[in-house]
Amino acid sequence: MQSQVKINNRQLTVLVTLYVIGDSILVLPSFPAMYAQEDAWISGLIGLSVGLLFIYLFARLGKLHPELNLYEYSSRVLGKWGGRAAALLLCFYFFIMVSAQVREMGDFMTTQIMPLTPIQSIQLLFLFIVVLGARLGIETLVRTGELLFPHFFLLFCLLAVCLLPEIDLQNVMIPLSSGVKPVLYGSLTAITFPFAEAVCFLVILSSVNKKEQMHRSMLMGALIGGIVLEIVIVLTIVVIGAPVAANQIYPAYSLAKKIGIGNFLERIEVILGVMWIITTYFKTVMNFYALMLGTAYLTRMSEPKLTTLPLGMILLVSSIVAFPDISYFNNLAGSYWPFFDFTVCLGIPLGLYALTVFRFRKKA
């Protein structure tokens, strides 16, 4: 199935950009602000710099195995049982990722936009379009991304310009006034949430047409997405202040509520909500697509689409059971999730890359 799917480098750039922005555009500013306070923007820059190294690692690993996806070359490098163990761990990771994103979608919609709607209804509808997107295939997904990409950036530029009159420079302090350690700790989420979680792209890199330009496309997409997130972090700090941002679950949404030009352009925060839904959808579908291929690999199914309906039903239950409430989810995301991301998203790809390079040199 993978060999029949082809995407070009421009589409890859668009998909990486939308993935990196993902759910981070709404929730990311609170985590660096929680630790680094007014220096959260420095944590964002560190996250962008280190995150690009993650993306480069993924691109290099994909180029070493140009015709195979992540699960296939895991077996080639680690052996039959080692490869299946790695695939099982990755599937568990993608399963938890999708469950968390479905829960996140339900929490946001029921607390900010549709408070009288049962959360299960929103999660069911969201999972339906996620499953539909995965069944239609990666080509349909990237073409949809190309269609929505200009609209997203038009809305982002509109919000950024409208927030300029609300900037209060008194919210900015001398850099590193709290020391280096809080800044480094605050950068963990800025590294893992947008960039390290892009490990799912290793399942589709074999479908890229021109492999020699693949790393440039991925780095460009990650850079654009990282700059967008850095702008959001900076605007959050200079408009609503670090103490307020640190205590908000959705600081960027509170930021958008500050927009008020005259008596006619105000209360347009729903625009940010629409932007977040678009990027979160693409991130969720990519993780679900990776889970679908991994499940088909482990169960030896010739048609991965057959796994989508059972996975969707299990994920609907998991999103409610695994994350019982929004406070539990927020504490888990801020305190433990970055280390979970580092373990899976750095450990497995780095190990595969090192073993592959070692074997190539041994053969040479």
Image: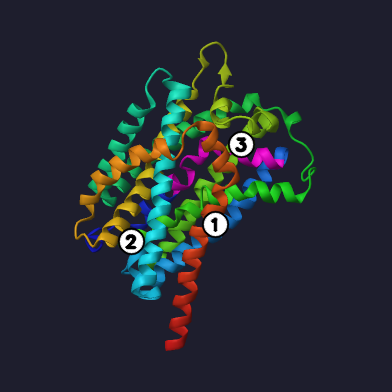
Q: Which residues, given as a range, are shown in magenta?
A: 17-36
The reply to whether the C-beta atoms of the residues labelled 2 and 3 are less than 8 Å apart is no
- The amino acid type of the residue labelled 2 equals Val
In this picture, is 215 found above or below 318?
below
Work out whether residue 152 can be spotted: yes
Q: Which residue in the protein does label 1 denote? A: 342
Residue at the image position 33 percent from the left and 40 percent from the top: 147
**Residue 215 placement: quadrant:** bottom left
| 156 or 237, nearer to the observer | 237
Q: Is residue 337 left or right of residue 149?
A: right
Horizontal and vertical percent position of residue 349? 47, 65
Q: Is residue 5 left or right of residue 191?
A: left
Q: Secondary structure at mark 2?
A: loop
- The amino acid type of the residue labelled 1 equals Phe
Q: Separation of disc 1 and disc 2 at Cα?
A: 26 Å
Q: Separation of disc 2 and disc 3 at Cα?
A: 35 Å
| 358 or 328, nearer to the observer | 328
Task: Reply yes or no: does residue 54 show up in magenta.
Answer: no
Q: Secondary structure at mark 1?
A: helix
Horizontal and vertical percent position of residue 216? 46, 61
Horizontal and vertical percent position of residue 191? 57, 51
Q: Quadrant of the N terminus?
A: bottom left
Chain-order first, disc 1 or disc 2: 2
Q: Secondary structure at mark 3?
A: helix
> Which residue is outermost to the top?
263
Q: Which residue in the protein does label 3 denote? A: 30
- The amino acid type of the residue labelled 3 equals Ser
Chain-order first, disc 1 or disc 3: 3
Q: Which residue in the protein does label 2 denote? A: 208
